[in-house]
Structures are given as C-alpha cells and as structure tokens.
Image: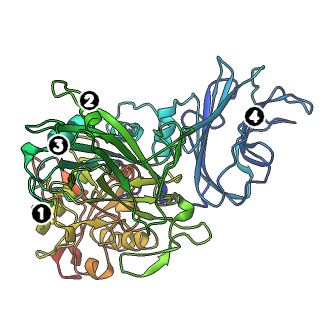
C-alpha cells in the first residue's frame, strides 16, 4: 500500500515525468512544474533549462531582484532579448513549495503558479525557439528539487491544483490495468463542500457536541437569545415565558481553508476562520415589541482572553472588521420575514491564527513536549476555541437575556497548522474543524484487489495472512459505514515508522510469496504502513494483514489514501478510519485472491506457526 503516494519519495531525489516527451519544445504549448525547498531567496537560481549554444529558450527560477521568474529569450544569441514574467514574489525559504509554469503559444503568454495559485502572467513580443539538447534539472539552485513534471500542453488551473495534490493531470485513457481509474481519481480537482444556512436550519437537531459539522472545513452552530421582562422581580433569571419574550435564533456557518485555493478576496489568509451569521428565526410572543422593542441586543464571538495565538481580524478589505453585531429588537425584527424562504445574512465574524504566534512547543500523542514553532520551524499548530455570547445594553425595566445553545457545546474548537510537504501538499497552511475523517472504499474503481483485501482484514480476519484466528485489526467502520469507537481509529505516522512497518510487511510477503517482487506484484498491507497502530508488538502478534497483488490496484489505493491525507489535512498523529461500499460478491478466499497459485504453504505465516 501507498507505493504510489508521491510524498513518500525521498526529498533529495530528482525525478522527471513527462506527458509526451522529455524537453517539450517551447515554441508550442507546455507546462513545467516541480517541488522545491530553497535554502535562501537571494540566489539567481535556475530550476530547469534546455540550452542551445549560447542561450536557453526559457528559464524557470528565481532572481534576487525580481523573485520567482519564468522568462524567455528571443534567439540563441548572446545579445538576445529576454522577456517574460518577473513576479516580484519571493520564494518560501526552508520549506517545500510547488512551482508551476505554463506557456500558451497562440497568445504567447507565460504564467506562473506558486502552491497552486496564480502569481501572474506576461505576454511575449516574439515566439520562442527550440533547443535540441536534453533538459537539465536543478541546473543552478541551492536547495532540494523533487518531482519535476513536463507536459506538452498548457495545464488549466484546476489541473495545476490536481498536480500539486500528488496527482497526474494526464487525460485518462482506457486500459485494463486500472490506470484509467488512477488518473481519474488523481486528477479530480479539490473543492470545498460547504454547508449552507438552509441546510443548517433544517438538519440541526439532536445532541451535537460541536454543532453540525459537515466536514473538516465546514460546519454550523446554533444559538438562541431570549430577551424578556420577568413578570415577578423574585423570579430567577432563567425562568422564561415564551409568549412574553422575544426569541431570536442565530446560525453560525463556520468556514476554514486548506492552502490558498478558494481564498476569498479582501486579505484572507490560509489560517483564517470565518463565521457567517444568519438570523434563522425570530418570534415575538403575544406582545411583539411591546416591552422590549428598544432593548439593544448584541451577539458576537470571542477567543478566550488568554488565547494569544488566535486573534480577531480587525481590518478586512480596507474596512474595519468587528466580530459582534448590535441592533435594537425592533431592528432585528425588520430583518426577518416569516413568509420568506430566505434566511437573512446579518454579518461575518473573522478570526486568524498567524503562524508566527503558534506556541513554541506542544504535547504529542504520548503527552511528550515537542517542538512546534522554534525559530519559525515546525508544524506551527494553534488550537483555537471560540465562544458565542449575547448581551443587552438597554434595560430600563430590568429586561434580561438568556443565551442558549441547545444540546451543543458552547465553544467551537478549530486547529490551524502550517505543516510541511512530508505531511500535506498545501504547505501554506490551513485550519480544520474537529471532524474525524474517513475514506470510503468502493468496488469497480480500479483497485478491486485492494478493496477485497481491506474488507477481509476488517470483517473476515481469520482468513488473512499471517494466520491468527484471534487477531484484532483497527480502523474499520462498524457495519461497513458507521463510525467505530475512538480506540479503533487509525492514526497517521511518518518516517521512520512507516518504513519500519513496511519492512515487517515485506518480510511476511517474501515468506508467503517468495518471488512476488520480481513478477509484477507488490506487497499490500493493512493497517497501512502510515498507521501508527502498527507496532513491532502488534505485527509480531499477527494483528495485520498482507497480500501480494499487481502494482496497479495497490498504487491506485495508495494514491487515494494520499489524497485523503492532503484533502482533509490529516497530519501525523491525526486519526481516521475506513468505510466500505458493501461486501464483495463473490468473496474469495485470501489464498485464491493474493497472487493465486503462488503462495508457499510451508511458510509459518501460512500455517500460523510463525509469530502468533
């Protein structure tokens, strides 16, 4: 598993992958892209080039005065004209970033993308020329280069995003080995699936600890304000007569981001948290406005006073920003029309967790203190908590307000981070809501062999290898789709633990299928090598499963798991689990499923005499 996951490549490795041929001619449409980690921003760097006798047709790199550049020369001549894009955008330093450049021949336009976002375009006054020599990688840089891609066409922005997400932007073509499914799964652009106010109002029922959370980047909260005048001075404040009070129901639609994609205008950063506020309902009882029409009701949100890493945004789009709204009850009343299907939007609360303000250290899963933001290096995780409040500022007759949250928690927790490329491809940062992510595996998507293996490991453990009738394997949804107990979640790890787990799996595969590695087969494993649940003790007890299978389904499943990590921003130590679309039919025996006819029955992992 995971052999097709690009982020597993060693960071010092230089690789090139071409859509058509190495060194696509600059006189036609083309795209070049790479992952980079530069040691400084002040060098005259050339990331890749294809030289003639005196010049290179184009240069992708960095200039000390102009930042990231994508320039062209008019001819292979020492005095040739140089034109193109000089972005004036400085490259990140000491962190991985993705750089892509496209050239469109019909308009002679050069464009540049940093971490999937456009940083400018420029038109040329000449057509580029061709150089017959081979392309060189890392021609002149101080740093590390990985995963260079060359395409003989212009990739559109969504394809640039997909390429950054560990995926191939190649147009899928039919094949029998699963490559169509691999390309389709990999090239699907990531979009945010946001909840809207109508859905929040309709579906917000029952007990919800953190509100109605749709996914890691979208959710909603609901709070109700009762403004009333007690009938009797001796009544406690929380005794409310609904017919004698003014009731206002507020919806807070939470929105976060992962990387720069989809950022709203006005100065939004990747570590911003937004709450769009709606007036979902209001009711004036038997005496609308009679006693409380001039009472001013303020609703707002705050981070705790001692939470310095998460802050109010005070200016947005050039205008002052406030994270509270104050109106008299009679003015709130004007906003809501009970005869309309529209839910009025009353404001947006904006918060930010700057990476520079992240705590220097944090506690890991084992409750050990680890570096988090030492000299600007680390995951720079900030755990933010926001509470909602309601107050009244005019109460001549002792009007009161009660602020309730139904059956949900009063506070909402958000985590922001700036993790590196080894964990997620969107290294510019992001924030997530407290949702446990899952991956839903499906049959007939180009990885049936892997699907059957995972399903068997979860629900037919006795018929898996290594043999151990009493084995326990975590990470599996209850009844294929329902969330398991917290103790059964998988949790993610990186190197060296991944490599160690894979090494133990390979040992079992070599014992069971001795020549699998030289016959087009790969060693698939569940739980995955990236699961921290895989320890030496657990593997020795046989609490996992291995299966020799063709490379295509194994790599397809690995790429999909990698997309889950990227798209849901799953960092090291984050939990996740697996769902399934149904029981495979027919359901084969593992001996007949894993490289049929080649298993070595003398292996102790087959008989159950080795290990457990």
Q: CA distance from mark 4 to mark 1?
A: 74 Å
What number is the disc on residue 236? 1
Element on which disc 1 rests: loop
Q: Distance from label 2 to label 1 (Cα)?
A: 30 Å
Q: Earlier in the sequence, mark 3 or mark 4?
A: 4
Q: Which residue is mark 2?
A: 334
How dense is the environment of label 3, judged by Cα within 10 Å: few (below 14), some, or many (20 and up)?
A: many
Mark 2: secondary structure: helix
Dot 4 or dot 2, earlier in sequence: 4
With 437 as the anchor, is 104 left or right in this view? right
Q: Looking at the image, is mark 3 or mark 1 earlier in the sequence?
A: 1
Q: Determine if residue 246 is in view.
A: yes
- Nearest to viewer (mark 4 / mark 1): 1
Q: Quadrant of residue 462?
A: bottom left
Query: In the image, which disc is placed on residue 71?
Result: 4
Residue at 65% in and 21% down: 105
Q: Looking at the rendered structure, which numbered label has been put on residue 246? A: 3
Q: CA distance from mark 2 to mark 3?
A: 13 Å
Asked where in the image residue 239 lies, by quadrant, the reply is bottom left
């Amino acid at each position: 598993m995971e052999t097709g996951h690009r982020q597993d490549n060693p960071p010092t490795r230089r690789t090139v992958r071409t859509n058509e041929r190495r060194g696509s001619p600059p006189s036609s449409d083309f795209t070049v892209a790479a992952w980079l980690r530069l040691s400084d921003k002040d060098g005259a760097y050339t990331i890749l080039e294809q030289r003639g006798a005196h010049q290179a047709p184009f240069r992708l790199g960095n200039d000390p005065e102009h930042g990231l550049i994508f320039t062209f020369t008019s001819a292979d001549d020492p005095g040739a004209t140089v034109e193109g894009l000089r972005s004036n955008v400085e490259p990140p330093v000491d962190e991985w970033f993705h750089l892509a450049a496209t050239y469109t021949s019909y308009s002679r336009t050069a464009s540049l993308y940093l971490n999937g976002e456009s940083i400018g375009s420029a038109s040329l006054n000449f057509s580029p020329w061709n150089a017959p020599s081979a392309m060189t990688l890392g021609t002149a840089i101080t740093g590390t280069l990985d995963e260079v891609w060359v395409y003989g066409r212009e990739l559109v922005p969504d394809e640039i995003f997909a390429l950054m997400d560990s995926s191939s932007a190649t147009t899928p073509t039919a094949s029998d080995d699963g490559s169509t499914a691999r390309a389709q799964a990999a090239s699907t652009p990531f979009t945010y699936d946001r909840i809207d106010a109508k859905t929040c109002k309709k579906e917000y029922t029952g007990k919800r600890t953190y509100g109605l959370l749709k996914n890691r980047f979208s959710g909603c909260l609901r709070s109700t304000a009762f403004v009333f005048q007690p009938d009797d001075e001796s009544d406690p404040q929380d005794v409310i007569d609904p017919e004698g009070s003014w009731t206002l129901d507020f919806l807070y639609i939470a929105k976060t981001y992962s990387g720069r994609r989809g950022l709203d205008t006005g100065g939004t950063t990747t570590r911003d948290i937004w709450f769009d506020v709606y007036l979902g309902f209001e009711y004036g009882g038997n005496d609308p406005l009679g006693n409380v029409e001039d009472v001013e009701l303020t609703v707002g949100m705050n981070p705790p006073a001692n939470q310095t890493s998460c802050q109010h945004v005070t200016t947005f789009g050039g205008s002052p920003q406030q994270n509270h709204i104050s109106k008299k009850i009679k003015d709130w009343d004007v906003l809501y029309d009970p005869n309309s299907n529209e839910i009025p939007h009353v404001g947006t609360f904006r918060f930010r967790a700057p990476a520079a303000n992240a705590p220097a250290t944090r506690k890991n899963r084992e409750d050990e203190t680890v570096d988090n933001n030492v000299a600007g290096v680390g995951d720079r995780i900030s755990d933010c908590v926001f509470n909602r409040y309601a107050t009244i500022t005019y109460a001549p007759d002792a009007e009161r307000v009660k602020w309730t949250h139904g059956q949900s928690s009063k506070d909402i927790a958000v985590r922001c981070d700036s993790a590196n490329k080894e964990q997620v491809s969107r290294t510019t940062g992001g924030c997530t809501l407290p949702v446990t992510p899952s991956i839903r595996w499906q049959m007939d998507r180009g990885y049936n062999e892997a699907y059957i293996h995972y399903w068997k490991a979860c629900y037919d453990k006795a018929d898996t290898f290594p043999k151990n009738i009493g084995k326990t394997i975590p990470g599996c949804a209850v009844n294929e789709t329902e969330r398991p107990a917290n103790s059964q979640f998988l949790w993610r790890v990186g190197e060296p633990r991944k490599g160690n787990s894979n090494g133990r799996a390979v040992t079992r595969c070599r014992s069971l299928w001795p020549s699998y590695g030289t016959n087009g087969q790969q060693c698939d494993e569940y739980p995955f090598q990236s699961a921290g649940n895989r320890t030496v003790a657990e593997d020795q007890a046989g609490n996992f499963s291995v299966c020799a299978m063709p490379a295509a389904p194994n790599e397809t499943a690995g790429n999909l798991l990698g997309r889950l990590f990227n798209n849901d921003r799953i960092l090291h130590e984050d939990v996740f689990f697996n769902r399934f679309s149904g029981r495979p039919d027919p359901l084969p025996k593992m001996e007949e499923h894993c490289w049929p006819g080649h298993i070595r029955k003398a292996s102790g992992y087959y008989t159950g005499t080795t290990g457990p």
